[in-house]
Structure formats: structure tokens, C-alpha cells
Amino acid sequence: MLISLTVGKVDAGVAVLLTQDKRLIEFPSILLPPNISSGSIVDITVSRNFISEQKSQSAFLALQESIYSSFGESEPLPPILRCKNATQTSVVLEWDPIELATADCISLSLFRNGQKAGNIPRPTSMRTTKISGLAVDTEYTFHLVLRTSAGTFSSEKVVVKTHKMTDLSGITVTPGILPAQLRDSLTKAVERIGAKLADTVRIDTTHFVTTEGRGIAWEKAVEMNIPVVRPEWVEGCERGGRIVGVRQYYLDADPRQRQIAEQQATSQQQKPAEQKARESPLPSPGPEQTNGSQAVPPTPPAKDVPREEEESSDDSEGDEDAEEEKSAVQEEQKVRVEDRELQKVAIHPAPEEKETEKQEEKEKEVTEEDGSGTVTPGQSSFQDVAL
């Protein structure tokens, strides 16, 4: 297709071309022939290039295919979580290596009972984690959430129940520096209580048993905050039938504290037996148990007193109390009467002088007749005294 255009204006980068119907077209001046000026007429041939279109289309499809094969055929897989070990207060979880395909890992989070417990450091290389501080004999639910550039993927939920105090199957013991004989006895004791024995310090190691605080394994146990105890701790667990505290069994612990703890444990074990013995009825001794001595007959139970006798006894006691109260009241009344009479005597005015002179003369006559200065009894009375 041939098109004739008139050059209207030529600039450094763009030339203005005019069509026959007076339309303006901006055209790159670098594509025009040299020495073009305003008013020049140029012919432009326009055609479609099918060969180039096919080449471009095939190149685009090849690019899409390579992108899909690199990033679209495989995608990240959800993590596979499982429980490795559980104790009374801790749980050790592990999972398979994370499959990211061509995606990038953003984070790997652990959830406990539906709530986020924290992020896993170095998720591409780390495959285990330990959760401590759990409650005894309690059920927990854990799952992992993987966030990648290709999306978010969650693992299946794992239900774990912590052990009871009497369940020692979750204990994992790693022996340290021990004599050969003591190591053998430790191995047998661990088998008897149902625990596990590990040759090296691992993430699921619960106790490090040794008699000397030195060595590479001891340093690793201290670094991982694993309790370092003496072999007597295993014996204490076996003797008590349950997991015991480690405070008295540390390497630098006082042996006296250990003895006190053992005595307390034995006393606690004896208490239930004593209670059972008290609750259980004692059998009556037979003739062979008395060893020839006469059997003491049991004391008969006290007979119930009839209600009438009880009521009569109560009535008699009540009558006696009432009589005592009456006598006490009468005595008080007598005392009050005497007090009143004394008060009357003290308050009453003195007799007249004449009467007192007559009484004195009578007394003198009596004394003269008797010949003594004393008054004989019976000659004077209280009636002669004027009140």
C-alpha cells in the first residue's frame, strides 16, 4: 500500500506530514530521506509482515513455557509434624524437611491450642523444637503454619498429652563420666523404670547423669540447660515409683538434703498404709493367740436409759435447783431486813434526858442490891430500852 504525504514542518526529532484530506501526522524525521524540507512529498509503502509475527509469537510461547516449567509445575508442600517425645512438663516436636519447590520461605510458625507460640528460627535447616513449662497430665494441640512467596500452607494438627507423675516412659537419660560398674547398674535401673537411654546429648534428653562435671557431653548438656544429676536420682525415681525433683541430686548438692528428701518420700509412702490399717477392722484374737491366758470378754454396750427415768431424773435435778434458789433468796431477804433494822436504829433520834436518868437510877439500885457493879443477866431486857 503506497501513501503520498506532504512534509509540512521538519524539526530535529519529529516531522509533521499532511495527508491529502489535510490531516496531520507526526512522523520520526530520522526515518525520512535526507535533505527533506517543508513542501516535499514523500511516498510511504505500508505492508504486514507475517513471517515476523510468527517468529514473535513462537518466542513468546517459549518464554511462557519456561516460566511455567520453572515456577508452576511444583509448589510448596504443607509441613508434616509429629511428636518425638513427651514428658510431664515438656514436649519435643519434629517435622520433615520443608518442600518449598521454587518459592521462597517467609516464616514457619508453631501454634499451640490455636494460638501462635512463636516462629521457628532457621526453618529451612531446623527440624525439631522443644516446648517446656506445660502442665502435668494435660492435652495440647500443635500445628505448623508455613508462609511462602507462593502462599500459606498449614500442617495437620497433632494432639499430645503430657505424662502423669508416675509415668517415667518419657525420661531420656544420657550418661556422662561414670565407673563401669555404676554405668551398668544405671543402665539396668533405667530399663526397670521404663525410661530411655541415649548415648549422646540430644534435644529430647531430659537428664544428664554423671559423677564428674567435665567433658564435651557435660558442656553440651549445660549449654542446653539439661539437668545434670547424680546416679542416685534414678534410684530415687525407682524407689518412689514416680519422677522426683532434681534439686537434691545435683553434683554440688548437699547429701544431707538428699537424705531428708528420701525420708520424706518414705514417710509419704507409709502414711497411706497406716491409714488403710486404721480403717480396716482388727480381727478378734482366737484361743491360740491368747497363749494360754484367759480371754478378756468384751465390755457390753451401755444400755439405753428409759426416757421416763431420764425425765424423772431431770425433774428431780430441776426441783433441787429450784429449792436452792429459793433458800438463797430467803437468806438475802433476811439480810436485807436486818440491814433495815440497823439503819432504823442508827437513824432513830436519841431518848429524852429524863428517861435516861430513870434507867441509870434503876441500874444503880440493882447493883446496890447485888453488891457488885455488874448487871445480872435476865434483870434487864431490850423492852426497857425505848426505841
Image (spheres, rainbow, N blue to C red):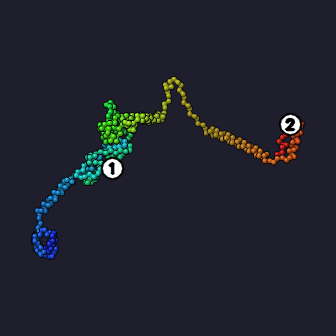
- Circle number at residue 373: 2
What residue is rendered at 42% in x and 35% in y? Answer: 257
Q: Residue at x 29, y 51 (%)?
A: 107
Q: Which of marks 2 and 1 is nearer the N terminus?
A: 1
> In front: mark 2 or mark 1?
2
**On screen, 111 above or below 31?**
above
Q: Where does residue 307 sit, x and y in percent of width and height? A: 61, 39
Q: Residue at x 54, y 30 (%)?
A: 298
Q: In which quarter of the image is the C terminus?
A: top right
Above or below, 270 relative to 97: above
Under tag 2, what secondary structure?
loop
Figure disc tally:
2
Q: Nearer the viewer, residue 13 or 166?
A: 13
Query: Residue 347's spot in the image, x, y percent?
Result: 78, 47
User: Looking at the image, which is closer to me, 83 or 12?
Assistant: 12
Q: Can residue 127 be seen in this view?
A: yes
Residue 356 left/right relative to 84: right
Q: What element carries label 1?
A: strand
Q: Mark 1 points at which residue?
A: 118
State the CA–CA distance, disc 2 to disc 1: 125 Å
Whole-percent x and y of residue 91? 34, 44
How packed mark 1 is, by other alpha carbons closer than 10 Å (few <14, some 14-19, many 20 or more), is few
Q: Which amino acid does label 1 sit on?
A: Gly
| Three-letter amino acid code at the position of disc 2 | Gly
Compare residues 357 and 53 and report the one nearer the observer: 357
Residue 313, quarter of picture:
top right
